[in-house]
Image (tube, grey):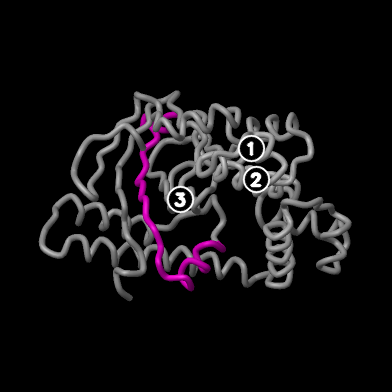
């Protein structure tokens, strides 16, 4: 194990008072939101998932995510350990990409994350190396736990992975249940049920999420107009594209491009966070 596998970009212990929000967004690095108290309604694509103590949101590059509302539990607000990082090792990256976006944590994982933060706060000799190695170990625990879950039904998992790969390769074209059923050699009912059980979302939602994720990339990284982007990601009707984009992201494609390029803060001004890597400072742009 060596610290060239990953690079920790930023750490934060954040506190979201009741009624706080985080606008739906995506970015080109990984991020973990680990809940240590309170409760929040997290936006995952166009679905809302409630996370409480001991759960975490695992986002990959370009995953759209946010928070629509937060609440106190036992008098405590939503508090989280947040880590932004990039991964350089391809094999490790492939393992991480198999994790679901919403996960159940564990005492071991939380303790290791706390150690990462303590090292970063104290900044004693070798703190960055210890923080990085400990965080890598926490990620391995996450992968190990998920592999145990997946191994209980490997055949179904293989079908789901094939469907995901097919959609990733063909999202620009027409994707139907008939074609996917024929591709994996299973009935439409089987693939719909297996996909929902494995991912927590329907095949159609996953397809739309992939298309909107790609559209978000094009909005930020190209000068293509919205109609060109709509067509490029598989929508034949621009109005359907705009409606789908707003439903999943929470704003129109035009506003998304404007906000991303202007660097407007996505988070409620009430949110407090202390960043400990790369430097100790108080920030609002979490």
Q: Position of residue 282 (x, y in %)?
A: 23, 35
Query: Going from the N terminus, do you reach mark 2 or mark 3 first?
Result: 3
Disc 2 from disc 3: Cα separation: 16 Å
271 in magenta:
no
**Secondary structure at numbered mark 3:** loop
- Residue 129 in picture, x, y percent from top left: 22, 65
On screen, residue 270 versus residue 236, left or right, reads left
Position of 159 relative to 59 (above/below): below
Specify few, some or many for label 3: CA neighbours under 10 Å numbering under 14, 14-19, or 20 or more: few
Give me the disc on residue 209.
Answer: 2
Name the element at disc 2. helix
Q: Where, by quadrant of the figure, is residue 215 drawn?
A: top right
Query: 10 Å neighbourhood of mark 1: few (<14), some, or many (≥20)?
Result: many
What whole-number distance in Å separates the C-alpha atoms at marks 1 and 3?
20 Å
Q: Is residue 78 one of those drawn in magenta?
A: yes
Name the residue: 60% across, 37% down.
48
Tell me, for residue 4, which label it has, or none. none
Q: Is residue 149 above or below residue 201?
A: below
Query: Mark 2 or 1, which is nearer the eye?
Result: 2
What residue does disc 1 label? 46
Residue at the disc numbered 3: 28
Q: Residues within 10 Å of mark 2 (few under 14, many from 20)?
A: many
Q: Say whether residue 165 is left or right of residue 180.
A: left
């Amino acid at each position: 194990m060596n610290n060239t596998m990953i690079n920790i970009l930023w750490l934060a212990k954040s506190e979201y008072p009741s009624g706080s929000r985080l606008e739906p967004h995506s970015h080109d690095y990984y991020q973990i939101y680990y809940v240590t108290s309170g409760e929040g309604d997290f936006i995952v694509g166009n679905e809302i998932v409630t996370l409480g103590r001991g759960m975490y949101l695992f986002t990959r590059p370009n995953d759209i995510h946010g928070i629509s509302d937060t609440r106190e539990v036992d008098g405590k607000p939503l508090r989280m350990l947040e880590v932004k990082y990039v991964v350089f090792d391809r094999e490790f990256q492939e393992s991480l990409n198999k994790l679901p976006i919403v996960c159940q944590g564990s005492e071991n994982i939380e303790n290791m994350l706390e150690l990462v933060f303590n090292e970063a706060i104290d900044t004693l000799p070798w703190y960055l190396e210890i923080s990085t190695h400990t965080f890598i170990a926490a990620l391995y625990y996450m992968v190990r736990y998920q592999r145990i879950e997946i191994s209980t039904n490997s055949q179904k998992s293989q079908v789901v992975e094939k469907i995901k790969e097919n959609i990733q390769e063909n999202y620009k074209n027409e994707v139907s249940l008939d074609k996917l059923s024929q591709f994996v050699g299973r009935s439409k009912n089987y693939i719909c049920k297996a996909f929902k059980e494995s991912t927590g979302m329907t095949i159609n939602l996953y397809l739309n999420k992939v298309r909107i994720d790609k559209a978000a990339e094009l909005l930020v990284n190209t000068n293509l107009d919205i109609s060109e982007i709509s067509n490029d990601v598989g929508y034949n009707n621009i109005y359907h594209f705009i409606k789908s984009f707003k439903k999943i992201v929470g704003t129109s494609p035009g506003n998304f491009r404007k906000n991303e390029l202007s660097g407007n803060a996505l988070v409620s001004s009430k949110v407090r966070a202390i960043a400990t890597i790369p430097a100790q400072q108080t920030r609002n742009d979490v």
